[in-house]
Image: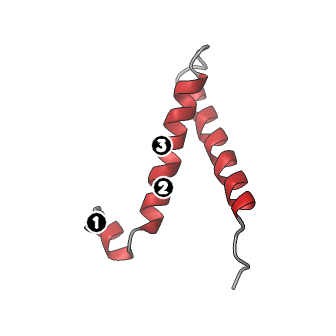
């Protein structure tokens, strides 16, 4: 069993994931200038969706839906 992830480590990993995704989005759009905030926001939403998906029970992920709130 691995040690628990502390908030600073988790935050650093999340930020690194956002940075990578934002760069991939920027590159996929042909590296346009002046779109950094939009790309960053898109990447943040993707990372949040990934986190939501990993929080959902396995049966809900397989069916492609979230559990009731």
Q: Residue at x 74, y 58 (%)?
A: 8
Quadrant of residue 63 within the rendered picture? bottom left
Residue 62 appearing in the image? yes
Decide which of tag 2 and tag 3 comes sooner along the chain.
Answer: 3
Name the disc covering residue 69, or none: 1
Name the disc covering residue 54, or none: none
Q: Is residue 42 above or below residue 17?
A: above
Q: In front of the other: label 1 or label 2?
A: 1
Q: How far from the left and from the top, in percent, is residue 22?
A: 60, 35
The Cα–Cα distance between marks 1 and 2, rounded to whole angstroms, is: 18 Å
From the viewer's side, name the closer residue of 2 and 27.
2
Q: How far from the left and from the top, in percent, is residue 40?
A: 57, 33
Q: Is residue 4 above or below residue 64?
A: below
**Total marks placed:** 3
Q: Which residue is mark 3?
A: 45
The Cα–Cα distance between marks 2 and 3, rounded to whole angstroms, is: 9 Å
Q: Which residue is mark 2?
A: 50
Q: Is residue 59 above or below residue 51?
A: below
Secondary structure under badge 1? loop
Q: How far from the left and from the top, in percent, is residue 32?
A: 58, 16
In the rendered view of the protein, which quadrant contains the C terminus? bottom left
Q: Is residue 24 above or below residue 64?
A: above
Q: Residue at x 69, y 86 (%)?
A: 1
Secondary structure under badge 2? helix
């Amino acid at each position: 069993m691995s040690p628990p992830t502390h908030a600073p480590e988790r935050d650093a990993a999340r930020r690194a994931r956002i940075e990578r995704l934002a760069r991939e989005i920027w590159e996929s759009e042909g590296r346009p200038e002046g779109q950094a905030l939009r790309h960053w926001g898109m990447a943040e939403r993707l990372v949040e969706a990934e986190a939501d998906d990993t929080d959902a029970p396995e049966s809900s992920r397989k069916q492609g839906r979230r559990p009731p709130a």
